[in-house]
Image (cartoon, rainbow, N blue to C red):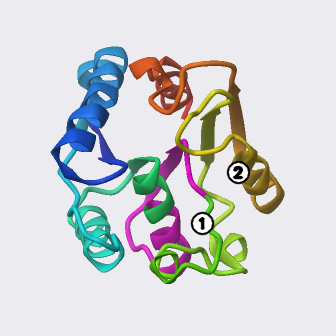
Amino acid sequence: MRKHVIFFQGGGGEEDYAADGKLVDSLQNIIGDDYTIHYSRLPDEPVPDFGRINQIDNAISNSADDIILIGHSLGASMLLKYLSENEVKKKISGVFLISTPFWSGDEGWKEALKLKKDFADTLSKDIPIFMYHCSDDEVVPFALFALYKQHLPWATFREIPSGGHQLNNDLTIVAQDIKSL
C-alpha cells in the first residue's frame, strides 16, 4: 500500500514553488514508488496566514490516515503553527520541518505567523517530529534552530554542515528518516 506525503512549500509565488519542486523531485526519486507526494501551490498572500492555514487544513483533512507531513521554510512554520493550534483527526506518521523560521519581532505582519508561547505543549509527543537546518542557510538564520531545540526537546534535530536554504536540492537525509518510520 502506498504511503502518502504532503509537502508544503516555502515562500510564495511561482519562483518559490518551482524552487521547492526540486526538493519534492529529489525526495520522490529517493523514496521511490512506495510513496505518493502531494505538492500543491500555496497561496501567495501579502500576509500568508489564513489562506495557507486553510489550505493546510484541507490537504490534511482530505488525506488518508498515516500521512507524512513535510514543510519547507515558511511552509514548515505554517505547518507547525497549524498542528499546534488545531485538532487533527487524521493519523500522522511523522512531521518533517526543513529550514523553519521562528517568527518574532513587533512588526504587524509577523503576528499571524508567530507560534503561541505554549505551542510545544499542544503538540502530540506520540508523533515523531524531525527538524533539519543547514548551518550555512542564507535565508533563515541557523541560530533559530537552537530555539526549536529548547522548545521541542523530544524532536529529532539534524544539523547539516552545508547546503544552504534549499539543502542543495538533496533531501536524502529526510528520505532516510521517512523510511525509518
Q: Alpha-carbon distance for marks 1 and 2?
A: 9 Å
Residue 97 at x, y = what percent? 53, 46
Give the residue number, with chain letter if any, for mark 1: 103
State whether residue 67 is above or below residue 163. Answer: below
The residues colored magenta run: 79-101
Residue at the image position 51 percent from the left and 75 percent from the top: 110
- 161 and 88: which is toward the camera: 161
Q: Quadrant of residue 143?
A: top right
- 163 and 139: which is toward the camera: 139
Residue at the image position 44 percent from the left and 64 percent from the top: 78
Q: Is 71 part of what is drawn in magenta?
A: no
Residue 126 at x, y = what percent? 64, 59
Badge 2: residue crowd in 10 Å (few <14, some 14–19, many ≥20): some
What numbered label is drawn on residue 170?
none
Q: Is residue 1 in view from this perspective?
A: no
Residue 3 at x, y = what percent? 31, 38
Q: Secondary structure at mark 1?
A: loop
Residue at the image position 57 percent from the left and 55 percent from the top: 101
User: Could you tell whether 134 is left or right of 76 in the image?
Assistant: right
Residue at the image position 21 percent from the left and 40 percent from the top: 15
User: Could you tell whether 31 is left or right of 147 in the image?
Assistant: left
Whether the residues at callouts 1 and 2 have beta carbons within 8 Å, the answer is no
User: Could you tell whether 143 is left or right of 68 in the image?
Assistant: right
Work out which quarter of the rendered image holds the N terminus and state it: top left
State whether residue 44 is above or below residue 128. Answer: below
User: Could you tell whether 20 is left or right of 39 in the image?
Assistant: right
Q: In the rendered structure, which amino acid carries the disc numbered 2?
A: Leu
What numbered label is drawn on residue 144?
2
Badge 1: residue crowd in 10 Å (few <14, some 14–19, many ≥20): some
Q: Is 95 part of what is drawn in magenta?
A: yes
